[in-house]
Amino acid sequence: MTDARPRPKMRTVGGTLEAFEQDLISNLYYQRGTTLESASGPDGYHTLAVTVRDRLVGRYARTAAAHYQANPRFVYYLSAEYLLGRQLRQNLLYTGTEQFVRPIAEDLGVSLEELEAYDVEPGLGNGGLGRLAACLLDSMATLDIPAVGYGIRYEFGIFKQAFRDGAQVERPDDWTFYGNPWEFPAPDDRQVVGFYGSTAPALDDPSGLRRQWTPAETVRGEPSHMLVPGYGTPTVNIIRLWQARASRESFDLSRFGAGQYKEAVEDIVQAENISKVLYPDDSTEQGRELRLKQQYFLVACSLRDIIRRYRLRNTGWDAFPAKVVIQLNDTHPVMAITELMRLLVDEYRLDWDLAWSITRRTFNYTCHTLLPEALETWSVELLERLLPRHMEIIYSINHFFLQEVAATYPGDLDKMRRLSIIQEYPEKRVRMAHLAVVGSTAVNGVAELHTRLLAETTLRDFAELWPQKFHNVTNGVTPRRFVRLANPRLSELITERLGDEGWLTDLERLDRLAGAADDPAFLERWREVKRLNKVDLTHQVERSTGVVVDPDALCDVMIKRFHEYKRQHLKLLHVITLFNRLREMPEMDMVPRTVLFGGKAAPGYHAMKLLIRLVNAVAETVNTDPVVSRHLKVVLLPDYNVSRAQVIIPAADLSEQISLAGKEASGTGNMKLALNGAVTIGTLDGANIEIRDRVGAENFFLFGLDAQQAVDLRRHYEPRAYYERDPELRAAVDAIASGVFAKGDRSLFAPVVDAMLGRDEYLALADYRAYVECQDAVATAWRDRDRWTRMSVLNAARTGFFSSDRTVREYCDKIWRVDPVRVEPD
Ligand code: 9GP
């Protein structure tokens, strides 16, 4: 390594620059077995990653020691997904080593950006639910909360999205292909999990409630962990991930010897399929069984690990709920309730009532949906086969619960039927949300409207029975990743204006920016930041789609999973309306816009895959039309993920949050976008309402039905009437039907038109006119540069409430009742 220029002597928590450089060289040599002269790109990345990671290891060791010493109450967060995003930049920032890397890399003739290209996003998540889990872990560490996240180490994650002829194709996300330098294997803590088999009475138990399960199959859970550092604190928590491995006996040596190679490894393949992918397609019986296997695998491994940890410092079971609080992230890990009962009653031989009291005091449940179809149920037949003992336990829990219900509502059979954990018709199924509510101390929704609607509709009978169980904890996002890392330019401007970086851990300090909204010089700089971010985005768009977009156009962004209730089709109707207007009046003075979509559709969700195809088809038509494309561009960026979000969000001017009111539990993209100065166009849904309350009605473009109006309208809704009476709407729908976006093929997108004119489940046609008018108001506001920039500044200034630090504090106060544990500083 050359040492051409004198470099400043720097010392941070990450050590000195010289020490960092030494460690890099030594890691390259001893860990990668190579030298500076012959190192490849992946060598460089891995060496850098390991060198940065090692700065966290000392902190992790001190955190573990402090936790051991304090023996505090721990939060154990159980989640099917974690959408962590790339780790390198985050860990450079959190260790204070960012400043070292640039000069060193410069000397070596390689840029940080080049190295970062090898930093792959862990394929452990899917959408808002998983990203929320990642934000909460970040905030827990930042607030020194003793916590462990538990999840599955999916080999292929969800999938990588590509487009072929505009259609989504799913490719495996082989995210560990080059290895994952951020992860530590922990083979000593492996667990064994059983499936199938039979149960028998425990001979010494007169109550009949204790039984013996003999599984027919076992699988090993191999743990590893990734470090979760806090920002501005030495606390480093972990996320523990389980990967399924066949038990040793699974390899059939005799078959292998006989040349039956496929058969010899059959059991291994079966076992390891459990952690292959996130959310395996559940449209087949096998797919459903695999999903349930995954869920049980996660909770069985995690609970044993939690008990192991508890027993390091505690004896007996009385203190268990005082030391262990388990948060169930949605219904996927809810089988943990029955598994803890099984462990306590069958294996640790506690009596049923004590076990139930411990269990109920240990668990809490966060519900993330309002869609009844998203509340999981499992067929009794499948459960009896896969987890026979758990099914018995569910029956017993339900039996005692319904006795309680009968005592509260004597003779009210209808109430019992509605509350029961078992749904009887049309087939017997276990309602996981009911099990979650019955087995938890606290249940929470994720935005005020969501919590209210849960209590009034989806979980109404439970909210009447146990009103004190229900809480609201509005979601939040981490400002470290979604402002500081994603938007360094804006962060610098904010820090300069506020005087220090305190806002990164106390986001409500952003409200002091409100005063700057009337300072023309500040507005100018704010605009400049946004413009530079838009230039970055245009490069990314061009690189991945070939479409050239204008950085000065209004950047109109809809980034989220494709789902009917989120109404990407409503946005598309607006786009087609603009297209039609421009075709009719080529000379019209339209505000130039780039409409940017990003999002994946579940592989089995055919309606949404067709919509993706339509978005791409409309984009192609718009972008190649010589007249229209002067004012309008449409892009669907492939493979939307956290890294792409970090480029799109800082560049967005307009944030599309247009779900039908009463359907989106919260949304968190809405928060990230507002914090980065995008103005929202949205309905009164999820956390939009709280965003609007804070930023002010004059800084938010509101349209459409509210939740109650939507329910009322649904009763007598006729989408065709809207179509008939609104010429622009008719023209937009007819354009799709005419085949203009499908090279004249009228049949390709006919199902989209049929769905709109037939049932229009999410009332897009009813909201169309209000939406288009609101978009016209957006365009008018955009023309007034100062007005728009003021709105943008005020959106960022007034959304500090939506920090996940505040969310975690609320969980701590209302639900977890845990205290921080301070870790010895560096
Ligand atoms: O759909 C909700 C989304 O509104 C919310 O922001 C997110 C985090 O709370 O959870 C999503 N829910 C799911 O992904 C599945 O229930």
Image (cartoon, rainbow, N blue to C red):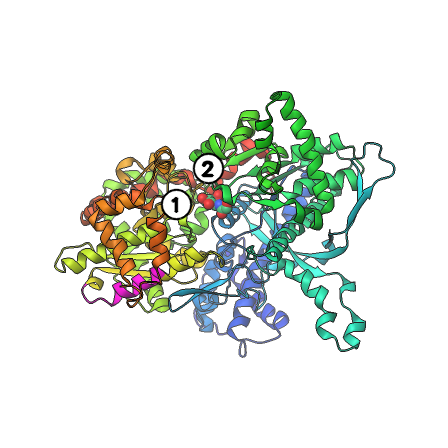
Q: Quick one: SS at disc 1? A: loop
Residue at numbered disc 1? 761
Q: Quick one: SS at disc 2? A: loop
Q: Is residue 215 left or right of residue 580?
A: right
Residue 242 in which image quadrant: bottom right
Q: Which residues are magenta?
A: 614-627
Q: Main secondary structure of the magenta part?
A: helix
Q: CA distance from mark 2 to mark 1?
A: 27 Å
Q: Amino acid at mark 2?
A: Thr
List the single residue furthest toward the front: 426
Q: Position of residue 512 (x, y in %)?
A: 33, 38
List the single residue furthest toward the left: 587
Within-10-Å neighbours for mark 1: few <14, some 14–19, many 20+: some
Q: Residue at x 67, y 58 (%)?
A: 244
Q: Position of residue 229 (x, y in %)?
A: 55, 50
Residue at numbered disc 2? 474
Q: Is residue 794 left or right of residue 313?
A: left
Residue 811 belongs to magenta span? no
Q: Residue at x 55, y 51 (%)?
A: 81
Q: Residue at x 57, y 25 (%)?
A: 465
